[in-house]
Image (spheres, rainbow, N blue to C red):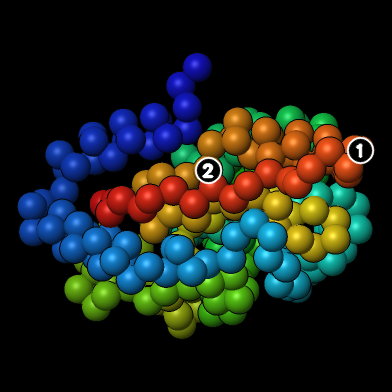
Amino acid sequence: MTTLNAELRAFYEARQQQIPPDVREIMRKAGQELKASGQADRALRADAHAPMFALPSATGGHLTLSDLLSRGPVVLTFYRGAWCPYCNITLRTLQQHHTDIAQRGARLVAVSPQIPDESLTLTEKHSLAFEVLSDVGSNTAKQYGLAFDLPSDLAAVYDKLGFDLQRVNDGHPRTLPIPATYVIDQTGIIRWSYVNADYTSRAEPADILKALDELNANSAAPAQGAGPVSQQPAAEPGA
């Protein structure tokens, strides 16, 4: 079976042939600068308390992390937006594993800085059965240590590509989250994390399921040791 990151890498390689060299260089430089900043290493990881949030959903309601945790563990994934092809591939793949996550008693929730209407379009496009929330202004992403501002030259490239982040992010066109995934237990503690400054690399569903299995095993037998360790891979610049 092809892994998520193998699919993302294949897409990346094919896409490189379609991007002009000067644009590729801007993307490469921005990726290297974000990696060198060390922000991914400073983001929240396993054993930290997950910041609480209350965010609007794609369907018009509001969800809080505390309410989600009252029903079981939460798999919280941050993505850049519906305009990002790597995010689309990732969310579509997560949907394919949604039943596996639910069978382990967990709730899957995706968060981006885009407005609810954009989240709804994405939800309908991929027939997503999990909640997609809007973190306009990236205040929640900031609490997790994930929010960063695009360099001006890369923001200009995204404008030329027609992403219109000014509109879809409701006046916050340059602020995006580093893609990340967290497994949070019912006490609000992060038990597993994947944070990577390279947006072309994402948490593998198999690793998420393994983290949930370990969380459930440790909950059933707390005396047998600590929970799963955070995965904090070395970031590579994407494009």
Element at badge 2? loop
Nearer-the-camera pick, 155 or 219? 219
Of labels 2 and 1, earlier in sequence is 2
Q: Tell me the amino acid under the disc marked 1.
A: Ala
Image height of 123 relative to 119, above or below:
above
* Residue 190 screen position, x and y as percent: 70, 58
Q: Quadrant of residue 133?
A: bottom right
Element at badge 1? helix
Q: How many marks?
A: 2
Q: Residue at x 24, y 40 (%)?
A: 15
Disc 1 target residue? 220
Q: Residues within 10 Å of mark 2 (few under 14, many from 20)?
A: many
Classify residue 4 as left or right of residue 67.
left
Disc 2 target residue? 203
Q: Is residue 165 visible?
A: yes
* Residue 203 screen position, x and y as percent: 53, 43
Q: Tell me the amino acid under the disc marked 2.
A: Ala
Classify residue 59 as left or right of residue 126.
right
* Residue 71 screen position, x and y as percent: 90, 52
